Image: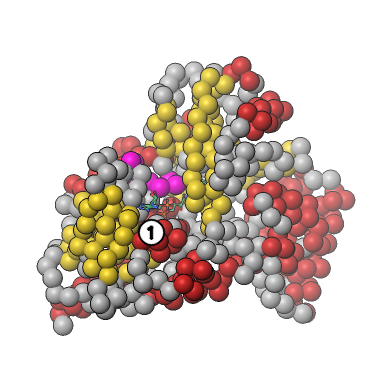
Amino acid sequence: MASPATPSSDQSLEPPPSTTPLRVVVLGGGPCGLYAARRLVGQPGVHVTLIEKEAIPGGLATSHRRGANFYDLGTHMLHEFDKEICDDVLAIMGDESFPVDLNAKIRWAGSFYRYPLQFSDMLKGIPPWTLGKCVAGLLIAQTRQKLFPRVPKNAEEALQQLYGDMLYRFFFKDFTHRYWGFPTTEMSATFITSKMPRLTAVDMIKKILAKFGIKDSVKAVDSALLEETLHYAKTGAEAMPRRLARFITDHGGTVHLNSPLTALDRGPDGRVTAVRFRDNATGAEHRVEADHVINTVPLKYLLDALSGVPASVREAAGHLRYKPITIHGLLINKPKCLDALYIYYRERLFHRIGEPKNAGLAVDPPDHTVLIVETTCEIGDEKWNATPAVREKIIADLEAEAICNRDQIVEWHVLHAETGYPVFRLGFEPHHETVKEFLKSIPNLQTTGRQGGFCYPNMHSAMRMGATAADTVLKAHQLAATA
Ligand SMILES: Cc1cc2nc3c(=O)[nH]c(=O)nc-3n(C[C@H](O)[C@H](O)[C@H](O)COP(=O)(O)OP(=O)(O)OC[C@H]3O[C@@H](n4cnc5c(N)ncnc54)[C@H](O)[C@@H]3O)c2cc1C
């Protein structure tokens, strides 16, 4: 599980001027922004306004209604890793949420493996000669790294150090290239250390090696847990953000949906004094005064809205790119297609297919099912446009995997997210630092979450980042109150 960077939540906010109530504006209504607002709402002397550009809250973590059914923007389930946040969110969701056991798989080299990958499954599925070479490669990589420790200069080297050359070539190299659209030699090693969960199977081999004094020296995210409970709802991912947004308004906060940020006004001291947004329903621009702003929208949109941004910072922000995603939501005339909640595919046009009905999604009609087919793309390319050729390839891949056939696809919906994944391209770090340093110079602005922090949290981690930003505001407020 990726541990999120804490982008600028560690910055000490200057206490706001002594206005009552404290006006906090949260930009973006994904899990991070919603949870920041949830944490602040109802606090004595605080008024929260949340601004979200889409007509429904949730950001990446939602489902969209198309016809009679809901389609997740990439299958989204809540993990339990952050108990405080999980308990709180489940209490807010009431009986709309239910637990689901993790049942995920990887399709690899003609077989299915449990996800996270288990050593016992690898023993059964991979030819002994290949497996032997993978383990030997891992041993060599571990020993070399112990004797001659080296900072990896790109993702390829980081993966080779973590897994050995053979396993890297066998499992990661081509898939990672296809997924991102560029080779691992052009990807930052930071991607591996902050995003990619270790393979559980490899952890097991490493434990054995550690007994012989050959210890891991490369930092990586902890491996995913095999036994894990997730949480989901009958309407899919949209239930959680909907309930959080309602909680915020029920407790006195204001949520503006369908309202993209247009500008941040700043005073002579550089502080943000007000936030402007457009109400898409009427086209009118509105202005909300702000003592503090918590930003969770992509950095490029934040900087576009800010005045007084030096050219060097705008130039640096131009290097912080996002990988868009296109999701194909299919209604299938078949009660069930997959023997899992989701399956990762390594050699197909799609890289993951989810069947949320297996997690409890209500499907209409009940003898049909919904498939969530995930692809990465670039804006305007043929995958983004879901061209007939791409659809044909998806159908061919679905048929080749015996998931369903062409005649069983009764509805086909295409969903997009322009900022699906921050791209950790080689050399992005100094550009990110430049942007962060500039934003830190604005005393009453924090930027956080997946988009505002340019990092890879899951929902619970994004919500934790929102909570941390909210607590920072409250702390500054209390300091001001007692000063
Ligand atoms: C395919 C996929 C599957 C995933 N599956 C899971 C999963 O199963 N479990 C899990 O825990 N995590 C999952 N995640 C991760 C999860 O989506 C993120 O952790 C979460 O969405 C991050 O929340 P956030 O609020 O930081 O960012 P976002 O969800 O991106 O929210 C940012 C918000 O800002 C809004 N915004 C953008 N521009 C503007 C603007 N100009 N004005 C106003 N608002 C604006 C956006 O509309 C959006 O609502 C998945 C991610 C992907 C891509």
Counting from the top left corner in percent of width and height, residue 230 is at: 46, 45
In the rendered view, does 253 fall on the left or right side of 373?
A: left
Residue in the foreground of this view, choosing between 36 and 56: 56
Q: Is residue 259 left or right of residue 478?
A: right
Q: Residue at x 77, y 41 (%)?
A: 109
Give percent across and percent down for residue 219: 62, 70
Identify the element where label 1 is drawn.
loop
Residue at position x 38%, y 59% from top? 296
- Tell me the residue at 81%/52% (across/down): 131
Residue with the most extreme left position = 20
Q: Is residue 212 left or right of residue 10?
A: right
The answer to whether 366 is drawn above or below residue 439 in the figure is above
On whether ligand 1 comes within 8 Å of the CB at mark 1, the answer is yes
Is residue 376 among what the camera can see?
no
Residue 25 visible, this orientation = yes
Q: Does the magenta stretch mainly form a helix, a strand or a loop?
A: loop
Residue assigned mark 1: 296
**Label 1 packing within 10 angstroms: few (<14), some (14-19), many (20+):** many
Q: Is residue 336 above or below residue 73?
A: above
Image quarter of residue 160? bottom right
Q: Position of residue 393 (x, y in %)?
A: 68, 31
Whether residue 59 appears in magenta in the rendering, the answer is: yes
Q: How is the image coloured?
A: secondary structure
Residue drawn where x is 33% and y is 41% of the image? 55
Quadrant of the frame with the C terminus: bottom left
Considering depth in this image, is 359 or 290 the residue closer to the camera? 290
Tell which of 409 and 97 is nearer to you. Answer: 409
Which residues lie in the magenta part? 55-61
Q: Is residue 150 above or below residue 384?
A: below
Residue 64: name its quadrant: top left
Amino acid at circle 1 = Thr
**Is residue 16 part of the magenta span, yes or no?**
no
